Amino acid sequence: MFWNQIKTVILLGGLSGLLFLCGYWIGGHTGLIFAFAFSLLMNFAAYFYSDKLVLKMYKAVPLDQEKYGYVYDMVSELSHNANIPMPKLWYIPTPMANAFATGRNPQHASVAVTQGILDTLKDYELRGVLAHELSHVKNRDILIATIAATIAMTIAYLADILRWSFIFGGGSRDRDRGSGIGVILVALLMPIAATMIQLAISRSREYLADESGAKISDDPLALASALEKLHFNVKNKNIKPTSNAQTSTASLFIVHPFSGNGIINLFSTHPPMKKRVERLRRMVR
């Protein structure tokens, strides 16, 4: 767990370094300050409104407490184990078996479950999934993921500015910034590097939530069993994203919600399922 925390700090530092470098290439020290200010502004908006946007995107409604009282009982017990306030529970009317947590901190957290996951998992497996999501809340992973996504998005935006300013003859010419080909390469490679670091952060936090979630529920095998079923559900239904917004929020879910093979998996926001399951089973051994 400690290594995953350290790795997240290192990766966030690398992502921030790319952001400042991109700003510096555009406008020197002025560009660096602009990049920092723009990143702060976007993070502020994401911090306060990202949870509302994602719940609305997936047409979530409050989970019916009378019909799903057992889910409320599970979350209440697990929240007590995790020593965090009980989050709001939401329902998403889709056959996709999945769940996610959102919210800027434990006091403003929400956990959403789909109809598919309620139909697919047994009670003890659902309990393992809910423990995983509460771990994201406890570890403040949503905030970390939001910051990482915002910085990566800002880098992509600044790289576009850098590329077009060079093409149309803009940018500072009073300092040596390398050849034109070098500028174009930097503008193209920086967003890719930022995306790869963002994905590494997401994978690291998933491992951490698996481990701490298993401890909260005191049942690593329940989560392992649930992950295998959910992974099979996604592959079996061959679910595809319907918008860029859904692609950008894929990291929120407990398993990657969209099917894909080959090179697509290199850009997955989640670690390989086999590794996640094996880690959980090692906790028991």
Image (cartoon, grey):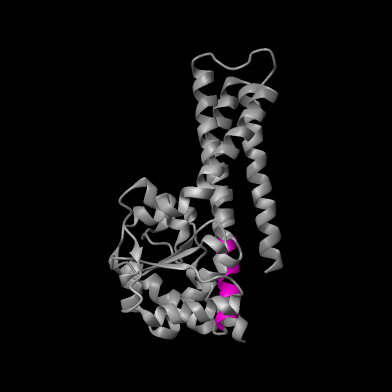
Q: Position of residue 22 (x, y in %)?
A: 61, 32
Residue 2 seen in this snapshot: yes
Q: Position of residue 32 (x, y in %)?
A: 66, 29
- Who's the residue at 61% across and 81% down the image? 282
Q: Work out which quarter of the rendered image holds the C terminus and state it.
A: bottom right
User: Which of the two residues, 188 or 59, is positioned nearer the viewer here?
Assistant: 59
Q: Work out which quarter of the rendered image holds the N terminus and state it.
A: bottom right
Left or right, 90 with reference to 21: left
| As drawn, 279 above or below 15 | below
| As drawn, 73 above or below 197 | below
In the rendered picture of this protein, how many numbered marks are placed on residues?
0
User: Which of the two residues, 267 or 244, is positioned nearer the viewer here?
Assistant: 244
- Who's the residue at 50% across and 62% down the image? 109
Left or right, 53 with reference to 149: left
- Who's the residue at 31% across and 61% down the image? 239
Residue 224 seen in this snapshot: no
Q: Position of residue 128 (x, y in %)?
A: 49, 79
Q: Which residues are magenta?
A: 203-217
- Who's the residue at 49% across and 57% down the image? 269
Rendering quarter of residue 90: bottom left
Rendering quarter of residue 218: bottom right
Left or right, 221 with reference to 31: left
Majority secondary structure of the magenta segment?
helix
| As drawn, 2 above or below 22 | below
216 within the magenta span: yes
